[in-house]
Image (cartoon, helix red, strand yellow):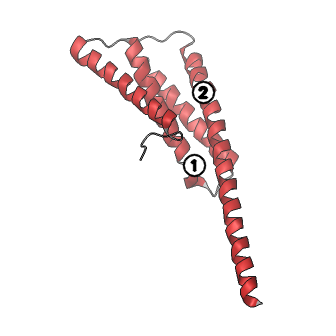
């Protein structure tokens, strides 16, 4: 039995890489006393990634709303959180004059790409499941037609 296969190879690499990166940051902070902008930026990217993934994963809770409204709502919520984090960080260290714009672009571009991939994958999966259900219904109808004869 293989635990790592073609389907989960890349996600497994991503999880291992993330754990190693977070472990490195933690070990540097605890044992070497190193915690600078670089480590803070990596942790911030990880935190934003967790938030964005969580928000995207909650789309099913809003099935009664149009998909475009859900997508825009998720994006607006996340941009608000990112801008709020940026604003809060301004109390601890000075921001560049273009800090908000840079953070907006640094978040929006990867998020939009990821959301497009996510929702296209979701629509493909729904279509695949609907086709499988249709095949089952067709098979059941053929089976019941044969019994009737």
Q: Residues within 10 Å of mark 2 (few under 14, many from 20)?
A: few
Q: Which residue is mark 2?
A: 110
Q: Which residue is mark 1?
A: 59
Point 62% across, 37% down: residue: 115
Point 42% across, 33% down: residue: 15
> Tag 1 or tag 2, which sits nearer the N-term?
1
Q: How many marks?
A: 2
> What residue occupies the far left of the structure in this picture?
31
Front residue of 48/121: it is 121
Secondary structure of the residue carrying tag 2 is helix
Point 54% across, 14% down: residue: 99
Q: The C terminus lies in which quarter of the figure?
A: bottom right
Q: Quadrant of residue 73?
A: top right
Point 29% across, 22% down: residue: 26
Q: For residue 91, say whether it is visible.
A: no
> What residue occupies the far right of the structure in this picture?
149
Secondary structure of the residue carrying tag 1 is helix
Picture layout, residue 126 above or below residue 93: below
Q: Are marks 2 and 1 in contact (CB under 8 Å)?
A: no
Front residue of 117/64: it is 117
- Measured as percent of width and height from the top left, residue 63 is found at 62, 56
- Measured as percent of width and height from the top left, residue 62 is found at 59, 53
Q: Quadrant of residue 141?
A: bottom right
């Amino acid at each position: 039995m293989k635990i790592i296969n073609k389907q989960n190879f890349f996600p497994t690499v991503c999880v291992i890489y993330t754990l190693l990166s977070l472990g490195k940051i933690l070990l540097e902070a605890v044992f070497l006393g190193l915690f600078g902008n670089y480590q803070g930026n990596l942790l911030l990217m990880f935190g934003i990634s967790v938030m964005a993934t969580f928000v995207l994963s909650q789309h099913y809770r809003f099935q009664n709303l149009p998909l475009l409204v859900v997508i825009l709502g998720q994006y607006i919520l996340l941009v608000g959180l990112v801008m709020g984090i940026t604003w809060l960080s301004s109390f601890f260290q000075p921001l560049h004059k273009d800090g908000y714009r840079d953070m907006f672009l640094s978040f929006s571009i990867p998020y939009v790409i990821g959301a497009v991939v996510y929702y296209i994958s979701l629509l493909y999966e729904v279509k695949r499941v609907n086709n499988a259900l249709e095949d089952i219904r067709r098979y059941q109808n053929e089976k019941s037609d044969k019994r009737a004869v």
